Amino acid sequence: QLHLESKAAKTERLKNEQAHRKKVRIEQRSKYKPVIIKDKNVARNEIDLCGKWLFMPEQNISDEAKAALPDFNDMNWHIMDVPNFWNQIAWWCMNSGQFGLRGQDEVFRYAETARTKGYTFDADATIAAWYRQWLVFPDKATGKRYTITFDATASITAVYFNGVKVGEHIGFSAPFECDITDHIKWGQKNLLAVFVNSGAGKGPAKIVGIAVTMEVTDEMLNSFPMGNYNSMAVSSDY
């Protein structure tokens, strides 16, 4: 049997879905806690920052110029697991040129759809986003340097610490690091803010990010090897 959803029913369904997302977002945000950095008094101390990060799509930030600043209110932000993709992993692999995502395992494709639909934000509409992680450094460690190391980000990234830009990166799977030593506020909360643009804009002339002073366009990104970047067009049957 074919069941067609009326306009009124669709409106009510979307309203209920939005209310549920808001409820889940508020609950998840209330459980978020800053990361406590502890010095183990060893020559080299590595601290894993994987876990729950604050997250907000670029299109949902009213004043993006302040998103990297510690006094910017993030109480309404979403929670994102790191490492993870906010969009479908299917977009990043096994793309078959003009045939989009055909050839991928169907179970995998629909599992990815379900995963991204489960977020408290609109993943399909998100091209770029901000991540935030609050860090607390209780004691000053004399003579030590502190660096933030990223195993990978995709594709255009800018890193800020306490509002100061400490690094930027273009790539997909290459690690990079940023030195934050001179910007740490000891005994206080410190903000690590990361802006990531997936590079998924359309059109050869559309600027999808800025690196140093060079404009980065889709045409440039699509010239990268397929293992690092490729068009995110999807097939009409997906």
Image (cartoon, rainbow, N blue to C red):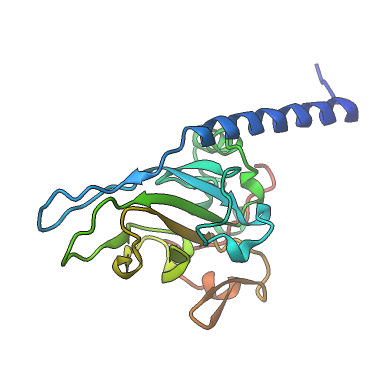
Res 54 seen here: yes
The spot of residue 230 in percent (x, y) is: 52, 62
Q: Is residue 190 above or below residue 3?
A: below
Q: Is residue 15 above or below residue 177?
A: above
Q: Nearer the viewer, residue 179 or 9?
A: 179
At a point 55% along the width and 29% down the height, the residue shown is: 27
| Pick the front one: 95 or 44 | 44
Q: Please tell me which residue lies in front, 171 or 129.
A: 129
From the viewer's perspective, is 127 left or right of 131? right
Instruction: Indicate whether 71 appears above or below 238.
Output: below
Q: Position of residue 150 (x, y in %)?
A: 34, 58
| Quarter where residue 15 is shown | top right
Q: Residue at image x 16%, y 67%?
A: 143
Residue furthest to the bottom in view is 213
- Judged left or right of residue 38, residue 192 is right
**Where is residue 206 shown, x and y percent of the image?**
66, 72
Q: Quadrant of the C terminus?
A: top right
Residue 52 location, x and y as percent?
A: 43, 41
Left or right placement of residue 159 versus residue 113 in this view: left
Is residue 93 something that shows in the picture?
no
Occupied quadrant, residue 118:
top right
Q: Quadrant of the N terminus?
A: top right
Total numbered badges shown on the rendered structure: 0
